[in-house]
Image: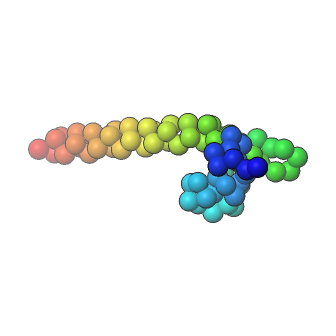
């Protein structure tokens, strides 16, 4: 019996979840850019860790965007 919200996901399932190509997921796993572990030669991913990773990336991108905006604002103010 397959559970819809499995705790451990395959590369294909993560790719579908993130809407990216499975080779990209595999590459990120090899490079340590996405939380993953190996069982034999196959990569596996904990759903909770993937969800946490997404939240961390979202926060980082949001704060990075704010920093950029602040830098641009400062640069504009310096020219006035």
* Residue at 71% in and 54% down: 11
* Residue at 88% in and 46% down: 40
Along the horizontal axis of the image, is 36 left or right of 59? right
* Residue at 80% in and 44% down: 38
List the single residue furthest toward the right.
40
Most foreground residue, 23 or 51: 51
How many badges with numbers are in the image? 0
Most foreground residue, 74 or 7: 7
Along the horizontal axis of the image, is 60 left or right of 8? left
Q: Which percent across, then down, holds residue 68? A: 33, 43
Q: Quadrant of residue 71?
A: top left
Q: Which percent across, then down, holds residue 4? A: 64, 49
Q: Which percent across, then down, holds residue 14? A: 64, 52
Most foreground residue, 9 or 24: 9
Along the horizontal axis of the image, is 70 left or right of 11? left
Along the horizontal axis of the image, is 72 left or right of 43? left
């Amino acid at each position: 019996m397959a559970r819809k919200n499995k705790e451990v996901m395959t590369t294909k399932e993560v790719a579908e979840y993130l809407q990216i190509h499975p080779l990209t997921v595999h590459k990120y796993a090899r490079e340590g850019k996405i939380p993953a572990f190996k069982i034999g030669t196959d990569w596996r991913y904990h759903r909770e860790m993937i969800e946490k990773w997404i939240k961390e990336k979202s926060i980082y991108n949001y704060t990075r965007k704010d920093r950029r905006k602040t830098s641009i604002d400062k640069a504009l103010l310096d020219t006035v």
